């Protein structure tokens, strides 16, 4: 069994899935694409034309990162990427909601910045950045609640860490001038600890260029 994962090198959504697949010991082949370019195969598998897409041996496509992770956890529950207790599981999913929301906001801002200067909306970009600032504050608060471990919940890697680490890695790449590492030293220490783990090291994001005009 070797599945295929269509991914983009900077994608925080795909990085979550890549780490989860490795954690669960599931072999897969990585197919790297730029989802915004006309040459992408993404529309063949996902009607929403978004990455990542997990393609099974029989050609079945599983898409949207949160659903792929839920599908993996249901089909291959061990080792689990969710805490065993109900409250912990719900909390991990709440962390993912916040992280994905920040990712969504920054993708919107990224493409707004690609528009011609006189067509950009500063209030719209500011609204997206407020979401990120609020999310960063919340992540910092959550990290400080578990001072006895390098992880967000308990003493093992969970979905919360996959989501938080993937967002922070992508944000550090795309918005390298943001001051979050000095604003939130506890969050920076937490992130640095995750980046030392094997599956975070071999999935570090790298930039891609969008060649087609999409805005």
Image (tube, rainbow, N blue to C red):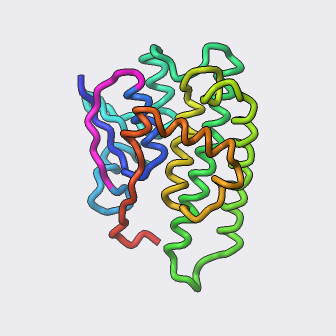
Describe residue 92's horizontal placement relative to residue 130 as left or right: left
Work out which quarter of the rendered image holds the N terminus and state it. Answer: top left
Give percent across and percent down for residue 196.
Answer: 47, 36
Q: Residue at x 48, y 46 (%)?
A: 12
Query: Between residues 106 and 203, which one lies in front from this camera angle?
Result: 203
Give percent across and percent down for residue 123.
Answer: 71, 72
| 192 up-or-down from 59: above or below | below
Describe residue 206's horizontal placement relative to residue 41 as left or right: right
Q: Residue at x 26, y 32 (%)?
A: 59
Q: Residue at x 41, y 46 (%)?
A: 204
Q: How many marks?
A: 0
Q: Which quadrant would residue 155 be assigned to in this image?
A: top right
Give percent across and percent down for residue 83.
Answer: 61, 19
| 16 up-or-down from 184: above or below | above
Describe residue 1's horizontal placement relative to residue 120 as left or right: left
Q: Which quadrant would residue 52 be assigned to in this image?
A: top left
Query: Between residues 212 and 82, which one lies in front from this camera angle?
Result: 82
Query: Between residues 49 and 206, which one lies in front from this camera angle?
Result: 206
Describe residue 61's horizontal placement relative to residue 200 as left or right: left
Stretch of the chain drawn in magenta: 23-33
| 145 up-or-down from 183: above or below | above
Give percent across and percent down for residue 180.
Answer: 66, 55
Q: Is residue 25 magenta?
A: yes
């Amino acid at each position: 069994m070797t599945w295929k994962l269509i991914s983009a090198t900077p994608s925080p959504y795909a990085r979550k899935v890549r780490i989860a697949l490795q954690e669960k010991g599931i072999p897969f082949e990585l197919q790297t694409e730029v989802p915004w370019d006309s040459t992408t195969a993404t529309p063949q598998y996902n009607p929403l034309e978004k990455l990542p897409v997990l393609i099974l041996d029989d050609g079945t496509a599983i898409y949207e990162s949160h659903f792929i992770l839920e599908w993996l956890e249901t089909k291959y529950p061990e080792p689990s990427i969710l805490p065993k207790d109900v409250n912990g599981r719900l909390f991990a999913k709440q962390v993912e909601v916040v992280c994905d929301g920040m990712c969504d906001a920054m993708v919107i801002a990224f493409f707004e910045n690609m528009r011609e200067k006189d067509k950009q909306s500063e209030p719209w970009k500011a609204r997206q950045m407020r979401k990120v600032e609020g999310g960063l504050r919340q992540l910092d608060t959550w990290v400080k609640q578990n001072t006895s471990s390098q992880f967000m919940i308990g003493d093992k890697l969970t979905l919360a860490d996959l989501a938080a680490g993937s967002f922070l890695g992508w944000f550090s790449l795309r918005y390298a001038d943001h001051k979050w590492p000095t604003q939130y030293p506890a969050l920076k220490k937490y992130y640095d600890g995750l980046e030392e783990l094997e599956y975070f090291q071999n999935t570090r994001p790298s930039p891609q260029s969008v060649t087609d005009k999409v805005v």
